[in-house]
């Protein structure tokens, strides 16, 4: 066990995992996402594609942790809904890029706005000290997210 892990009591890691899961589940079902009939996976993929503008399908699959066959199905569904477009790579006919359409960008922006509004409303219910603790924890949480992302690949 690493020295850092020894500093946490046995409840900290499970509590952190549980609260991250609850936050994620409670932020997913926005009116925009539900209205569009998007699953959590499709929401995640759409938000990712919208954020990066244009991405190779293989890189998107790796970034999202979804096998390429499943990613192809997700992209096909999002393309059928007019939210993304699959574009062949002229340099490699086996490869493809994915980019969000104007409708996809608009929906992603609305989902982000609704999630931000939900968080703002919930934060308003906390006292000033609790909000300050959350703000102070953000750099460590951002670093934790990066550690989880890079740890998945090693």
Image: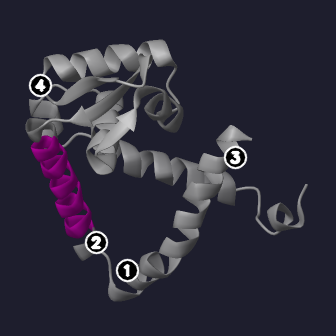
Mark 2–mark 3 contact, CB under 8 Å?
no
Which residue is tagged 3? 151
Give residue 77's position: percent from left, percent from top: 23, 17
Range of magenta residues = 105-122
* Residue 54 occupies quadrant: top left
- Which residue does the numbered mark 4 point to in the structure image? 82
Q: Viewed as shown, does residue 116 lie left or right of 126?
A: left
Per the model, the C-alpha gap separating discs 2 and 3 is 30 Å
Label located before the other in sequence (2 or 1): 2
5 over 30 or under it: above or below = below
User: Visible in this render: residue 125?
Assistant: no
Which comes sooner in the sequence, label 4 or label 3? 4
Eye-nearest disc, 1 or 4? 4
Secondary structure beneath dot 2 equals: helix
Q: For this view, does 139 lie left or right of residue 94?
A: right
Characterize the magenta stretch by its predominant secondary structure.
helix
| Mark 1 surroundings: few (<14), some (14-19) or many (≥20) residues within 10 A | some
For the residues labelled 1 and 4, the Cα–Cα distance comes to 39 Å
Residue indicated by mark 2: 123
Label 4 and label 2: CA atoms lie apart by 34 Å
Q: In this view, does 124 lie to the left or right of 146?
A: left
């Amino acid at each position: 066990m690493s020295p850092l892990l020894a500093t946490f009591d046995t409840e900290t890691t499970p509590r952190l995992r549980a609260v991250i899961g609850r936050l994620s589940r409670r932020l997913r079902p926005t009116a925009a996402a539900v209205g569009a009939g998007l699953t959590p996976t499709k929401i995640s993929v759409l938000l990712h594609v919208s954020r990066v503008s244009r991405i190779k399908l293989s890189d998107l699959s790796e970034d999202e942790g979804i096998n390429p066959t499943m990613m192809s199905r997700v992209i096909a569904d999002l393309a059928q809904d007019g939210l993304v477009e699959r574009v062949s790579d002229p340099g490699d006919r086996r490869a493809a890029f994915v980019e969000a359409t104007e409708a996809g960008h608009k929906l992603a922006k609305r989902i982000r706005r609704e999630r931000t509004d939900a968080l703002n409303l919930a934060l308003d219910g906390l006292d000033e000290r609790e909000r300050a603790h959350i703000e102070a924890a953000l750099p460590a949480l951002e670093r934790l997210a990066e550690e989880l992302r890079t740890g998945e690949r090693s």
